[in-house]
Image (cartoon, helix red, strand yellow):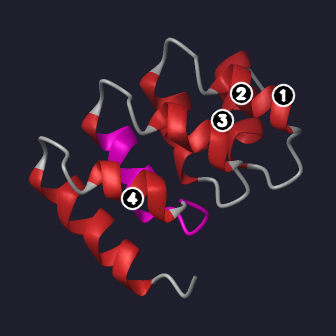
Amino acid sequence: MNILEFKLFLAQSEFTPKEILELLAKDELSVIRLYVAGNPKTPKEILEILAKDTKSHVRFLVSVNTNAPKKILKILMKDNTTYVREFAKSNFFNKKF
């Protein structure tokens, strides 16, 4: 397993500690950030950081993440990218809290 594969494994694992996910959320490779954004165990504070990512595909995975709180989804509902806005809106209105 090389370093990229190891980072991808950690980024998507439900057992990765918050501190590691926070480091991976700041990785220079967007694919690493993408996996963190899609991890349903990523804490809300880290999703908030990723919701401001420069890459729309990272913001998209935050918008569909089941752990994304309404506060973050409201922000993403104003995103420049249509599909991010639409999925954030859908996730927002499907929240039960």
- Residue 89 vertical position relative to residue 73 in the rendered view, above or below: below
- Say whether disc 2 or disc 3 marks the residue closer to the N-terminus: 3
User: In this figure, which residue is indicated by the disc labeled 4?
Assistant: 73
Q: Which amino acid does label 2 sit on?
A: Glu
The circle on residue 96 is none
Secondary structure of residue under mark 4: helix
> Which is in the foreground here, disc 1 or disc 4?
4
Q: How crowded is mark 3: few (under 14 residues within 10 Å), some or many (20 or more)?
A: some
Percent x, y for residue 15? 89, 51
User: In this figure, which residue is indicated by the disc labeled 1?
Assistant: 19
Q: How crowded is mark 4: few (under 14 residues within 10 Å), some or many (20 or more)?
A: many
Secondary structure of residue under mark 2: helix
Residue at the spot 30% in from the left edge and 77% down from the top edge: 90
- Say whether disc 4 or disc 2 marks the residue closer to the N-terminus: 2
Magenta part mainly helix, strand or loop? helix
Residue at the spot 20% in from the left edge and 58% down from the top edge: 85
User: In this figure, which residue is indicated by the disc labeled 3?
Assistant: 8
